[in-house]
Amino acid sequence: MAPPYDVLSEADVQHYRSLSPYNVVHLTRPGTDYEGAASTFMRWLDDRILEPEPRSMYVHEVEFDGRVRRDLIASVRLQEYEDRVVLPHERTHRGPKEDRLALLRATRVSLEPLWFLYEGQETGVPAILNLVASRSPAVSFEGADETTHRLWVISDPGIHSSLHEVLAQKQLMIADGHHRYETALAYAGETGGDADSPAQFTLALLTEISDPGLVVLPTHRLAKAGVAVTGGETAGSLEDMFQKMRGRVAAGAYRDGRFQVLPLEGEMAVVELHEQVIDNILGKRSPEELLEYTRDPEQAVRWVDEGVGTAAFFLGPPDLQQVLRMAREGKTLPQKATYFHPKPPSGMVFDRLERDRRL
């Protein structure tokens, strides 16, 4: 097991590689040795490190910080964004998609579940998951960030049918995995096949949006260049800055040893911060050139003090219903506008995209 590929530093990758020759990072983070990852996967099958299962769905439960979240793991049919069935909420960059597409072409395996949210408290899906989770789990394990995970197998075709019937009517919003979703769409277009071929689907983890264990955190920004921002309100410390931001459409800023609160016009702080401040700093440069991201505000301050960047910008937790509303309106947020926590671990389930199978 390991966290998703895109939250791992190179040091993290080496750590997980050292834990076991069968850790999932050997597949999800192979560098550029994509064919090597494909060979590794087939070898694990041959050596029975991995075992094929009959048609199944899964209940995943994560316990953390006194909270519990329950998710459904299943296959989701890929649909273009313009169909308004799968809703993105963040912009993507080209580089990660090229890497993931090369890995998908080589392995022909959906290696990590994409994370989707849906509104469905009234559908009975949470009740079904709770009923399944009343049994003993098939697997229990400890994960990153002091999380405990449990996994149940749903092999009953009757339950599959019930879940399919209600969820097929729902819009899904991508919580995590925009790059991988667009990669899967590209691969499906390359591969072709009929509507029920596995390449037309992706491995997915689905969470009901009102689940009490669903946590969304802000991601802070470091600008590597740019002029000082004027007109902000002075704050005495990092804590004072966050206190003054609370309940307002506002962002924090740190530069030259000084904290500020930046009042913003509009509805959503992350959108207005980019439109009113960061986009002016970027000019014609891409965010990939000029921005770094962190969830740790103290790290952002250190980066500025150490000269890694010139200024840090801070945000409060985004409003999830507001994010969903904007997604339904066809509006996308800046990259890393949300950070859903804790991430579904990789390595629980894989989905082979064999050409002769049908879903």
Image (cartoon, rainbow, N blue to C red):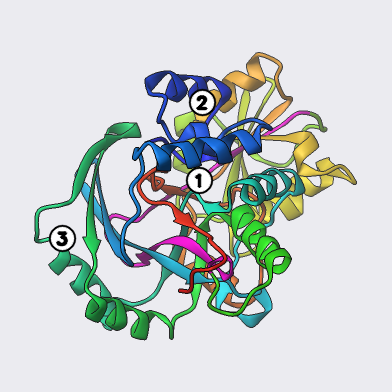
Element on which disc 2 rests = helix
Q: Which residues are magenta?
A: 198-224
Mark closer to the chain start, 3 or 1 = 3
The spot of residue 324 in percent (x, y) is: 51, 69
Point out the residue furthest to the front here. 46
Compared with 139, 30 (above or below) is above
Residue 265 is at least partly visible in this image: no
Q: How far separated are the C-alphas under marks 2 and 1? A: 24 Å
Packing grade of label 1 (10 A; few <14, some 14-19, many >=20) is: many
Q: Residues within 10 Å of mark 3 (few under 14, many from 20)?
A: some
Q: Label 2: few (<14), some or many (≥20) within 10 Å?
A: many
For the point 49% across and 40% down, which residue is it?
A: 41
Q: Which mark is residue 13?
A: 2
Q: Give whichever of discs 2 and 1 has the lower sequence position.
A: 2
Q: Work out which quarter of the rendered image holds the N terminus and state it.
A: top left
Q: Is residue 191 magenta?
A: no
